[in-house]
Amino acid sequence: MSDLPASAANYCYRHPGRQSFILCQRCGRTICPECQTQAAVGVVCPECMKQQRKNAPRTKPAVLTRLTGSDAPTVTYALMGVTFFVFVLQWIPGLGVTQSLAYQPAITLLEPWRLLTSVFVHSQGGFPFHVLLNMYMLWIFGRVLEGMLGRARFLALYLVSGFAGSVGVLVLASPYTVVIGASGAIFGLLGALLVIQRGLGGPPVTHVNCSCCSESTW
């Protein structure tokens, strides 16, 4: 089969030196791969895409809810409040809150509730960076996800993620590893947000630094 005859119409209108046979679906001009933007049907050139975005209705995304009234992320704030309250109790001598709520695979059959209660206790070593960082991440992701999922599903996601983190320790770690912290729940929220944003066609979250937000032992 012979090649198509070359003509000015077979070259990108923005890059005359690049041959192409792809046309913009809106204006019909030839565009090279660099100038193509995927549309619902076919591709469009940069100028048409710019005009399309300019004429698009300016609506607020559903995930950007108000933080007052009925739209307030009450579950997020409640989880933060409970966690900080438990952290204060951890500092009271004689209560043994940390030892009572922390999770250890060796005692899973005897006290299985620790798979979940360990999410609400944090390291007491030095300045409370562990709890502050985890609650900061919960504050960031929780406000967005609670608006997306609703309060009940968001709470279920947080608790199931924390439970799954403990199960991971049960499967992978030593039976005598003692684990505390909400990091498993936080990473579950992050994973859910990435999946939801990808499904909505939005950009992924790429600039979150969680290097200090890790499970701790005592």
Image: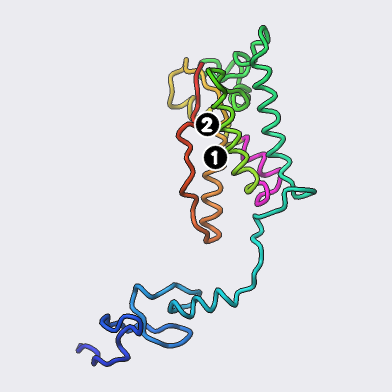
In the displayed structure image, the side of residue 95 where residue 122 appears, left or right: left
Q: Which numbered marker is on residue 92?
A: none
Q: Which residue is drawn at 80% across and 48% down?
A: 69
Residue 209 at what x, y percent from top left? 47, 40
Q: Residue at x 55, y 48 (%)?
A: 193
Residue 204 at what x, y percent from top left? 49, 53
Residue 43: tell me if it is visible: no
* Callout 1 touching callout 2 (CB < 8 Å): yes
Q: In which quarter of the image is the N terminus?
A: bottom left
The stretch in magenta equals: 146-159
The answer to which of marks 1 and 2 sits earlier in the sequence is 2
Q: Which residue is drawn at 63% across and 43% down?
A: 142
Residue at the disc numbered 1: 188
Amino acid found under the numbered disc labelled 1: Gly
Between 2 and 42, which is closer to the camera in this rendering?
Answer: 42
Q: What element carries label 2?
A: helix
Q: Is the magenta stretch mostly helix, strand or loop?
A: helix
Packing grade of label 1 (10 A; few <14, some 14-19, many >=20) is: many
Residue at the disc numbered 2: 165
